[in-house]
Amino acid sequence: MNKIVCGAIAAALMAFTAPAFAGSNEIAVIVKSSASNFWQNVNKGATAAIAKHPEFTMTFQGPAAEANVADEVNMVENAINRKVAGIVLAASDPDALTPSLKKAWENAIPVVLIDSAVSKDADKYYQAFLSTDNKKAGELCAEAMIKAAGTEGKIAIMSYVAGVGSEIGRVGGFTDYIKAHSKLQIVGPFYSQSQMATALNQTIDTLAANPDLKGIFGANEPTANGMGRALAQTGKAGQLAAIGFDGNQDLQDFVRNGTLQGIAVQGSFQMGEKGIETIAKIVKGEKVEKSIDTGVVFVTKDNLDKPEAKNVLY
């Protein structure tokens, strides 16, 4: 594709209107998995936002599991073929979705990313990125871990899908902070593929292999859920520092009963809500910020029932 054509496409994306360029008024919200409460909360936010924009309709879908990257790619390709007005996308793989993002860009379909980054080569193919600052969120969890577990001994990291943008920032931020501010030794990370049952079994094995473990970190909702259940099943709940990530009802209950000392909770509702709002602005020709921080709140037993936590828990 020559520079003139590329320039024309870029110009179109900056100022196009839905009737002129889109084949429909549909905004497609495509997430990593339709099975997780986290992504269903994104759906709730998107649904709330679309109600304020009767000029658009919305569809929501995601693979059965976050590891099913090919399924998500097909969903994006199908949305492009439907000539949707815009796509709100949580990319399950930073590289695999790049060709689809390029195709959307070539077809003047705006894309707003949520939650996870894509490869730097794809930067020009999307118009905005809404996410938690995962590096800072990981550091926040590490700070809480050191406070609860101390500065020496062993801790384990129970992660989810290796190489995903959010995982790189989150676990990387956690690991770097631990290394810089303590003498804690790290066991893992272990990857659950965002499957609760896998995380449960991995945690049981890790606890058995490391009876002297002083702390454990579960880096996303299904992983932290499996981790909490393993701690309860093995009688280790409350006996070592446990920090989770995300905020569904199970994780809230684990905080309330002391199985987990705290959870870092993202603004998942806000991702869906602001994702729709941002697409609507782009389609109408309004300028938007390239990067939008949707925030994180660290929830403990002390603030579990306070407004700051209630606003992000789901």
Image: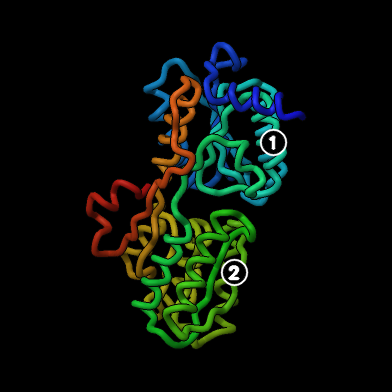
Picture quarter with the N terminus: top right
Q: Residue at x 71, y 29 (%)?
A: 3
Q: Is residue 124 left or right of residue 285?
A: right
Q: Residue at x 51, y 38 (%)?
A: 128
Q: Quadrant of residue 167?
A: bottom right
Residue 38 lies, with reference to residue 196, above or below; the image says above
Which of 310/101 is in front?
A: 101
Describe the element under mark 1 as helix, strand or loop: helix
Q: Residue at x 47, y 21 (%)?
A: 285
Q: Residue at x 27, y 58 (%)?
A: 304
Q: Quadrant of residue 55?
A: top left
In percent of width and height, residue 180 lies at: 46, 78
In percent of width and height, residue 99 lies at: 72, 39
Q: Which residue is mark 1?
A: 100
Q: Is residue 84 left or right of residue 302?
A: right
Tag on residue 201? 2
Describe the element under mark 2 as helix, strand or loop: helix
Please rate how many residues cluster around mark 2, counting C-alpha atoms within 10 Å: few if below 14, some from 14 to 19, many from 20. some
* Amino acid type, callout 1: Ser
Q: Is residue 165 left or right of residue 44?
A: right
